[in-house]
């Protein structure tokens, strides 16, 4: 039995959930999301709860049961509250800014890097903190990962782009490693 799949999803006020065939559409104050759910999973929409049940009990179906529940839960949460990820730029001369709806990064390369936000995603920059926000959790995480991939944190000095609160274990340099013996 899937522990996650068994939990019902509460529908907050102002959120509307519709089911047409295998497609689930969630509408809320922040926007609208829709997704196809696998045939093995049965979705029941009540007055204020959504419950999911597997049609056939196999190990694979139980995995999809929990996955489907998580995806629908994230859709409901996204249209009501939204999601955001924060990235921190660290390094001398490293900076970011917004120009004409694009994120412009100066990260020590010979040129500046321009990133257009995917549909439904917004970028904002305050000092050295980049905020990626939107209603689709998958797109927010993907956009944040792409930004971090441009200049991941350096293991020796710690310079680069990291998630806010992420701790980087710094390596000891060659001189410090040799002189300690």
Image: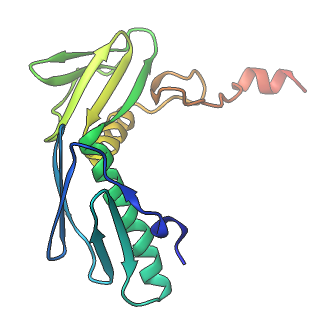
89 sits left or right of 115 in the view: right
Q: Where 21 sits versus 31, above or below? A: below
Q: Is residue 2 left or right of residue 128?
A: right
Q: Quadrant of residue 168?
A: top right
Residue at the spot x=39%, y=78% of the render? 53
Q: Quadrant of residue 141?
A: top left
Quadrant in which residue 65 is drawn: bottom left
As displayed, is residue 168 above or below residue 19? above
Residue 56: x and y, percent?
A: 40, 90
Tell me which residue sits at (60%, 25%) in the image: 156
Q: Nearer the viewer, residue 121 or 13?
A: 13
Quarter of the image that includes the N terminus: bottom right
The x and y percentages for residue 108 are: 36, 18
User: Residue at 13% across / 41% down in the picture?
Assistant: 119
Q: Residue 2 location in percent, x, y?
A: 52, 73
Q: Position of residue 64 (x, y in %)?
A: 40, 74
- Where 98 sits versus 117, above or below? above
Answer with left or right where residue 134 lies relative to residue 120: right
């Amino acid at each position: 039995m899937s522990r996650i799949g068994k939990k019902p999803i509460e529908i907050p006020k102002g959120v509307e959930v519709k089911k047409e065939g295998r497609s689930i559409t969630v509408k809320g104050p922040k926007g609208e999301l829709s997704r196809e759910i696998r045939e093995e999973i049965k979705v029941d929409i009540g007055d204020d709860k959504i419950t999911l049940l597997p049609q056939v009990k196999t190990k694979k179906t139980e995995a999809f049961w929990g996955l489907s529940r998580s995806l629908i839960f994230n859709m409901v949460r996204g249209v009501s509250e939204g999601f955001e990820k924060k990235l921190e730029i660290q390094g001398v001369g490293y900076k970011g800014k917004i120009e004409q709806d694009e994120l412009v990064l100066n990260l020590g390369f010979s040129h500046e890097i321009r990133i257009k936000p995917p549909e439904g995603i917004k970028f904002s920059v305050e000092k050295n903190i980049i905020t990626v926000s939107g209603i689709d959790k998958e797109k927010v995480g993907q956009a944040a990962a792409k930004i971090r991939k441009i200049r991941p944190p350096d293991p020796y000095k710690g310079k680069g782009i990291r998630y806010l609160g992420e701790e980087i274990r710094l390596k000891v340099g060659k001189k410090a490693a040799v002189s300690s013996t």
